[in-house]
Amino acid sequence: MSDRLELFSFHGKMRILHLTWIAFFISFMVWFNHAPLMGIIRDAFGLSDQQVKVILIMNVALTIPARILVGMLVDRLGPRLMFSSILVLSGLLCLPFALADDFTELAITRFLLGFVGAGFVVGIRMIGEWFPARQTGVAQGIYGGWGNFGSAASAMLLPAIALWFGGDDGWRYAIGITGVIAIAYGVFYYFSVSNTPKGSTYFKPKKMGAMEVTSKSDLALYLVMSLPIYGALALLVWKLSPANIGWLDEGLSLTLYAVIAGVYLWQAYHIFQVNREIFHKEVPEMFRYDFKQVAVLDLAYLVTFGSELALVSMLPLFYTDMFGLSPVTAGILAGIYPVMNLIARPGGGILSDRIGRRKALLILFTGIALSFLLLGQVTPQWAVPLVVANTLLCGLFAKGGSGAVYAMVPLIQRRMTGQIAGMAGAYGNVGGLLFLTVLSFVSTQAFFLFIGGMAGVVLIGVFLFLREPQGQTAEVMEDGTVQMIDVS
């Protein structure tokens, strides 16, 4: 059977792929619909620079825990219901943001809208259900790469829509339109897709509340790998605390730190509860998986998607400050970087399908490390076209790496694909926050070198600990029979 995808077909699994990447595209368009309009919103409300920073931070604050929660829910409820619900709910939340009368209303609704960034996780499970292992890389790459373009679409279209409506309320109409689109498409998606192909079984986790692991050492690693997610939330609180932006007072900051610590302990308790059987009996060999695979993919996505988030945020100022380019020119050059998702992420998936998951990640992370280390040598004396070319090379490897990570995620354990995808996705947001925090303390060159160094560390991790998916994994059907699923 041919491994080629009929890209322009709209039947069978290709129909699901197209409908799902469009759902992801709309979710990202909603998530970033404020960004290109922030200048207009700032002037309309007379916001200070500090208040603008608060709104931008609030937009990503909820995304990190939401990806974990949505990963659990999609494994239990199915991607059809989850993606539809996320789109409709986020569309409804766009309306109070568009109708906001003051800064507080803007900040609160933006915080709530941050959960729409978790929609990405839902599609990973949907595509994993519909495409076989030999095609999952390219299918996930198309889904992620084309859907990611929703943020760029917001940047290109929404200012023009606001200008077309004109007046002080033009931005409100632009935001409202994205909400209406999300609501309409959410309803359409629910009635247009199914969770699995006809005759296939949708496998669900045995227990809710945490990921199932299959050994005591994996349990310990799971607890350790959960810590950075909560650490990132604490870092967000620090950014809003008196020690930084100062939007939160000291008492509220300390309270939030305590809440974050309490939630981690609560989650750790649930991790133990879900996996307590491993202390009494061994998991049969056919049902085992190695959690180190999840850990390596988490760290890999921290570098790939984390660097993407960071560079999208800082490249315009980098071109302006270091080379004296006008804001318009700098914006155009920086805008090329996210557009590369259209080809680079599918390219990483194709490479993974063709030469193997582990080998593809080794090649791509070598490229990430070397290209960022080279970018760290940039000075104002460098020719601008050379710097742009180097930046795009970083993007080519990093976005390709994101495609390769999610080419492997659905092959680890089918019934927990959502949770594995959610944890890796959360690590991507952790990476963006980490890298931008580092940038606030060091020079731009040191920032690039830091990303290159992190890529080098992950490269070693891939080489030492990542195993190529081979053979089959086992899942138990409702009647107790075992079904084997090809992963190679």
Image (cartoon, rainbow, N blue to C red):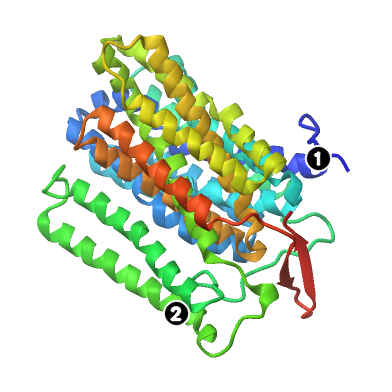
In the depicted structure, whether residue 141 falls above or below residue 267: above
Residue occupying image coordinates x 35% and y 30%: 313
Question: In terms of image quadrants, where is residue 14?
Answer: top right
Mark number for residue 3? Answer: 1
* Gap in angstroms between the C-alphas marked 2 and 1: 41 Å
For residue 102, say whether it is visible: no
Q: Amino acid at mark 2?
A: Phe
Q: Secondary structure at mark 1?
A: loop
Q: Residues within 10 Å of mark 1 (few under 14, many from 20)?
A: few
Quadrant location, the N terminus: top right
Q: Nearer the viewer, mark 2 or mark 1?
A: 1
Label whose residue precedes the other's in the sequence (2 or 1): 1
Q: Is residue 479 left or right of residue 61?
A: right
Q: Is residue 143 left or right of residue 449?
A: right
In the depicted structure, whether residue 387 falls above or below residue 37: above
Q: Amino acid at mark 1?
A: Asp
Residue occupying image coordinates x 39% and y 22%: 170
Q: Position of residue 486 (x, y in %)?
A: 76, 59
Q: Residues within 10 Å of mark 2 (few under 14, many from 20)?
A: some
Q: Is residue 14 left or right of residue 148?
A: right
Residue occupying image coordinates x 64% and y 60%: 78
Mark number for residue 330? Answer: none
In the picture of the structure, the residue carrying the numbered disc 2 is: 272
Q: Position of residue 328 (x, y in %)?
A: 35, 11
Q: Is residue 431 left or right of residue 277?
A: left
Residue toward you, 213 or 261: 213
Q: Residue furthest right?
A: 1
Q: Position of residue 279 (x, y in %)?
A: 50, 87
Cβ atoms under marks 2 and 1 closer than 8 Å = no
Q: Secondary structure at mark 2?
A: helix
